[in-house]
């Protein structure tokens, strides 16, 4: 009997996992180059991140993190004696483009792995294509709870904290400190909606209530009507789920109107590229993050120095959470291949499921692990605000506290996640 793990990817796909009966085969490996030996064949990774659109800045930071990890492995001889190669195509912060990019990466670029995302809608689109082909996909930086909930897949692993994690870290404390009447200011797409839903649920649990929810289309640059509604409604707290370039515009206009101190502002998650270089008066409110370059933990200072040495001309002179997530995801992908001793996708998936990562290795306060049910990384969440006494120009955040993975765990995700079986996932060796 043939071992399923030794069946070629082409044979699996032709046999029906991804093709309708009688259709031609145009999938990966249909026109492979011939290599002198297996060790001569590079490990090909497709980077699926934004270079334009709302999250272009975060996409660039995400890629820099991935490339630093790859360089560190290639400098040591690669993985399993094979060099790592990458290709990148702009996903444009658009789900339809994300699908096309994933199809091209797999079927034309012959990528055996996919990595990268900031927009949750784009990540979901990529993951559907990845699952159809059995290609392991690391969602590095998108944080809708649905990514490890109803949109989970056997091949997908989610490396960022999600909206539920950040809301759990912030909501109860903010009710106690600021009041229980809240307005939700929400980007009108999947991440915004699901993050606002998580905040609403926790508000109800802790005795707060939503006075109003204001939906803001992606690409909004004029927040005057939304801010007028907030002034008129006089909530105790505004919980904003606004991301990317939209958030920069929002912060600038809130600061111009002198609204940063009252009402209180809670921004579910604050990505470093969205605020880097802004005046401190624009950095109002309390917000969540997964990492900061001034954490004062072992390894952090060296990590920053490696970043600065590799990217001496980058405008961001210190790494942030998006770079960190890209680096950690890529590093752990390559380490999982090493642990598996193989590029077989099912073997690598099994190495990742339940994998534990020490606090020292993660440069966080708590040990982290990959939930075997949802494939989300369970990790420390930090709450921060503007640093009124910076020690240097880039020291923009004051870390208020750190919250353990158990305390912020998304308890709804395991029930919502209906993951495909191993047998229903096409298998191949990259």
Image: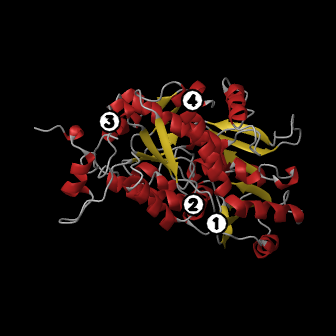
Does 313 appear above or below 19?
above
Question: Within the image, what quadrant is residue 14 found in?
Answer: bottom left
- Secondary structure at badge 2 equals helix
- Tell me the residue that label 1 is attached to: 187
Please tell me which residue is depicted at 60% across the width and 25% down the height of the picture.
360
Closer to the chain start, of discs 1 and 4, is 4
Given residues 342 and 44, the one toward you in this image is 44
Q: Assess disc 3: are there few (<14), some (14-19) or many (≥20) residues with their C-alpha within 10 Å of its C-alpha.
A: some
Given contact means CB atoms under 8 Å apart, are the residues at marks 2 and 1 in contact?
yes
Per the image, the residue denoted by label 3 is: 347
- Residue holding disc 4: 72
The quadrant of the image that shows the N terminus is top left
Compare residues 255 and 279 and report the one nearer the observer.
Answer: 279
Distance of label 3 from label 4 (alpha carbons): 24 Å
Q: Is residue 111 visible?
A: yes
Residue bearing the label numbered 2: 191
- Say what secondary structure mark 1 lies in: strand
Place of residue 285 in the rendered image (x, y in percent of width and height, measured from the top left): 78, 52
Answer yes or no: do the residues labelled 3 and 1 have beta carbons within 8 Å? no
Task: Give how far apart the Cα atoms at labels 2 and 4 are.
Answer: 33 Å
**Residue at the image position 75 percent from the left and 73 percent from the top:** 226
Instruction: Report which quarter residue 38 is drawn in.
Output: top left
* Mark 3 or mark 4: whose residue is earlier in sequence: 4
**Residue density around tag 2, few if under 14, some if 14–19, many if 20 or more, within 10 Å:** many
Q: Which x, y percent locates residue 251? A: 79, 60
């Amino acid at each position: 009997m043939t071992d399923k793990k030794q069946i070629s990817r082409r044979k699996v796909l032709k046999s029906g996992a991804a093709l309708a009966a009688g259709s031609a085969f145009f999938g990966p490996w249909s026109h492979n180059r011939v290599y002198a030996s297996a060790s001569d064949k590079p490990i090909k990774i497709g980077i699926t991140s934004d270079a334009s659109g709302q999250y272009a800045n975060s996409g660039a930071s995400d890629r820099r993190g991935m490339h630093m990890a790859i360089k560190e492995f290639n400098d040591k001889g690669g993985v399993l004696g094979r060099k790592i190669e990458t290709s990148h195509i702009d996903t444009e912060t658009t789900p339809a483009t994300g699908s096309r990019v994933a199809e091209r990466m797999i079927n034309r670029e012959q990528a055996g792995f996919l990595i990268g995302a900031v927009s949750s809608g784009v990540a979901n689109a990529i993951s559907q294509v990845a699952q159809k082909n059995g290609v392991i996909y690391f969602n590095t930086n998108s944080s809708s709870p649905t990514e490890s909930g109803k949109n989970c897949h056997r091949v997908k692993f989610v490396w960022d904290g999600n909206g539920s994690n950040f809301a759990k870290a912030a909501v109860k404390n903010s009710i106690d400190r600021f009041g229980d009447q809240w307005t939700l200011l929400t980007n009108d797409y999947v991440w915004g909606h699901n993050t606002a839903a998580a905040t609403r649920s926790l508000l109800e649990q802790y005795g707060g209530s939503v006075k109003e929810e204001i939906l803001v289309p992606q690409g909004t640059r004029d927040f005057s009507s939304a801010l007028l509604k907030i002034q008129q409604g006089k909530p105790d707290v505004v919980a904003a789920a606004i991301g990317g370039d939209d958030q920069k515009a929002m912060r600038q206009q809130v600061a111009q109107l002198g609204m940063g101190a009252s009402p209180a502002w809670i921004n579910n998650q604050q990505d470093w590229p969205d605020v880097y270089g802004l005046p401190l008066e624009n950095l109002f409110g309390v917000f969540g993050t997964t990492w900061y370059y001034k954490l004062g933990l072992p390894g952090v200072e060296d990590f920053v120095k490696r970043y600065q040495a590799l990217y001496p001309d980058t405008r961001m002179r210190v790494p942030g959470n998006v770079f960190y997530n890209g680096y950690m995801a890529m590093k752990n992908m390559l380490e999982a291949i090493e642990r598996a001793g193989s590029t077989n996708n099912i073997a690598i998936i099994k190495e990742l499921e339940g994998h534990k990562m020490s606090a020292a290795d993660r440069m966080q306060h708590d040990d982290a692990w990959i939930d075997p049910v949802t494939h989300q990384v369970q990790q420390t969440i930090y709450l921060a605000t503007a640093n009124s006494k910076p020690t240097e120009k880039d020291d923009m955040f004051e870390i208020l506290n750190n919250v353990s993975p158990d305390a912020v765990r998304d308890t709804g995700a395991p029930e919502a996640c209906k993951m495909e079986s191993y047998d229903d996932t096409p298998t191949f060796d990259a």
